[in-house]
Amino acid sequence: MAVALVGGAALGAAFGELLKVVVHRTNQTARFGAQLKRLEITLKRVEPVFNEITVLSKVLERPDDETAEFTRYLEQGTELVVKCLRIKCWNVRKKYRYTKKLIRLDEELLRFFQIEALANVAKTTMMNLIGTNELNDKFDRLHLTGGGFLGSCNVPGLPEFIVGLDQHLTILKRTLLKDDTRLLVISAPGGFGKTTLAKMLCHDPEIKGIFDANILYVTVSTESSLMSIAQSLFKHYGIHNSVFRSEEDAKNQIENLVIQKGSGNMLLVLDDASSGSESVIRHLKFRIPGYKILVTSRNLFPEFNSTYDLITLNDKDAETLFRHHAFTGDEIHVSVELVNKVVEFCKGVPLALTVVGASLRGRPEVIWTTTLEKWSEGHSVLESHQQLLLCLQTSIDALDELHKNCFMDLGLFPEDDQIAGTTLMDMWVELYKLDDKGMGAGTNLFNLSSRNLINLVQIRRVAGERDGHCSQYRVMQHDVLRDLAIYLSRQEPEAKRKRLFTEIHSNKFPEWWTQQPVDARILSISTDGEFNSTWDDLNAPNVEVLILNIRSEHYTLPCFIEKMSQLKVLIVTGYGGYPTQLNNLQVLASLSKLSRIRFEHVSVSPSIQVIFTLKTLKKLTFVMCKIGEALNSDTTGSAYTLENLKEFEIDLCYDLKQLPARLCGSSRLKKLIITNCQELDALPEELGNLSSLEILVLHCCTKLKELPESIGSLHKLNIIDISDCSHISVLPKQIGELSNLRTIDISRCEGLEKLPKSLAELKQLKDVICDEERSYLWKDIASDHSQVKMSFVEEDRIGNLKKICR
């Protein structure tokens, strides 16, 4: 009992007396039953850590006046609980007042301990004061006399209320108990309930029956080493004098301990493992029958391929959890609509629902309304709930500067958006000097994904591309993590921020707009469907990346873009039902540093041709755009120069029928990618003028019937992808002149009847990608194709059906 343990010191006595009185009064009166029960739960949750602090205080012989203030607060709490019993049933006003006081007492206790966090800090501070050798005996004596159990690996208790994890527990338990499962990782961002799920598993009767007393629970901090974990495990079994000479020695001794103690089965739980814990986990994997490891982490560990991804709560469970923390008993003093809106903002994250619910408990409806208004105006849930913020921010603090910046950049895009990996590459190449081949951006995305900060959605891989290229992914981010990215970017005044994100509703500009100039390097402007493109002037001379997110049918580029002399990247995306009509493209003509432009889901006028005169443009991308007429008309009378253009990508542009011959005058173009353009039926003979072209992708251009004979002039070409071009029946014989061709993809080219024999004579050809039916075309012409690797692609029947139905 806590009272017996801490009765010798003033603080311990005060804590023990308050807990005793609360338990006694809870059983004695129904008038404050709910409030007293909640207070009892809070006290019992912090009691184990509190007891350890008391033991450490004894060891260090710390004076009681260090904790005098908190001791007095606990004594006042005891007096308050005693007074509650004296209040008569008929005295409604007094009962209401004391109910509020009990709620406030509970909240203050939670705030003081921060649900064990502050207590742990105090405990750690005391432990750092203890000499590692001279006080060992003193600790052992305290342990043997019941004075606390430091280093124990006992499973912690469960939270007082859990919802939405039963199904996860069933699946997790089934997976863990498989014979071939030696290690299982529960992975999710902070606040999703990983630790709670792990505790539920440990307390499950079936698991306890299998592993009995050999369920060991170790919380892994960033400072944890194999040797410190070994100390905890040995102390758990009462072995206090173990010496570990090295990590390898610790590993061997732990393995012997597992064999000795786990004569039946043993489960080792490693809670909250960080990205640097991989080697520790690896050393703890032993091939011992019945021995299993369960890990919880915000990170993914590719080395360990058995992972359980914990997702957010569904709507029903989210509301249940929120109501439990927001309301006392049957007391509901706000509308169902308000409750639903608050729950929606919490995005199904258990920690958010718990923290926000507790903060609104007992508050008048006007506070709820005000809170919602702040969130609706762009303020984050994180800004008003420090505990939630601190929990999530630890994942970001562990990142280096580059990855932290990349994470915060994701907040520049609309909620629930799937961001193309190549969009992020365009930004990061210019901002952080990553390589322009896409591998650096892909590595960054993979690293953020491994820490559960983003989700990567794999899309089609271009023939010949290396694994990990950013073009293979679209990026999704949980709404709460996006809120965190925005929050972290808002820590300075708007005019001084390096990364500035703003939303314009109707034509209401934010107050900072008039604070001229703004210092941002990255500017993201989102406008709604009612915005009429009447722009207030903005002075932002240092902007290097401009992102425009549009929901209106018509949109005029602002004239202040002309003053952005440092602008290097422009990303314009329409989010309406139809492509947004984009006007005033002339403002781009004077931008002397603009090197990358991406248009998505917009309709461009013939004035788009002004950008083809930009001498600094290196990459131009159109996705789901209406561009056919604009590309094929010449309103400027000037030649297409694009003398520095290296990449030209067109995807899902349904009205593109022909590629204008004038676009083939870019002598430095290295990559031409045209995909999913169903109406494209011809390529110009001038294609052969692209003397620097290395990659030609014409995927799923289903009406395209042939490649021009001039393709033989592309002597630097090393990749051709004509997959899903179902109407191409024959390839020009000049393809045999492509001396540097390494890869060709002819998969699902149903109309292709034969291949030119000259193709088999190419000495550099290493990879032919095809389906089974097209493989015979290659075998017919290649007598000796040992140098060539044939990669088979399975037939995508669902994809074919979609193409037929278009």
Image (tube, rainbow, N blue to C red):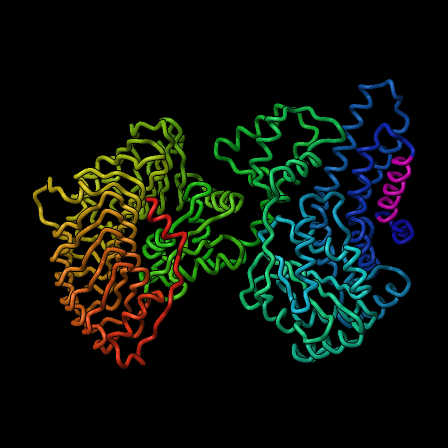
Image coordinates for residue 682, horizontal then vertical, percent: 17, 52
Within the image, what quadrant is residue 180 found in? bottom right
Residue depicted at x 68% and y 76%: 287
Image coordinates for residue 687, horizontal then vertical, percent: 15, 58
Q: Looking at the image, which is closer to me, 562 or 324?
A: 324
Please provide the residue range marked out in magenta.
12-27
Question: Eyeballing the image, is 803 above or below 374?
Answer: below
| Magenta segment main secondary structure | helix
Image coordinates for residue 45, horizontal then vertical, percent: 78, 47
Tally of numbered tags: 0
Residue depicted at x 37% and y 33%: 527
Magenta region includes residue 166: no
Q: Would you say 178 lies left or right of 134 here?
A: left
> In which quadrant will I find the C terminus?
top left
Q: Is residue 567 visible?
A: no
Image coordinates for residue 651, horizontal then vertical, percent: 29, 50
Q: Looking at the image, which is closer to me, 456 or 10?
A: 456
Q: Would you say 315 lies left or right of 708 here?
A: right
Within the image, what quadrant is residue 382 found in? top right
Q: Looking at the image, which is closer to me, 385 or 526?
A: 526
Q: Looking at the image, which is closer to me, 106 or 375?
A: 375
Residue depicted at x 36% and y 42%: 523
Q: Is residue 376 visible?
A: yes
Question: Eyeballing the image, is 89 above or below 234?
Answer: above
Question: Eyeballing the image, is 49 above or below 712?
Answer: above
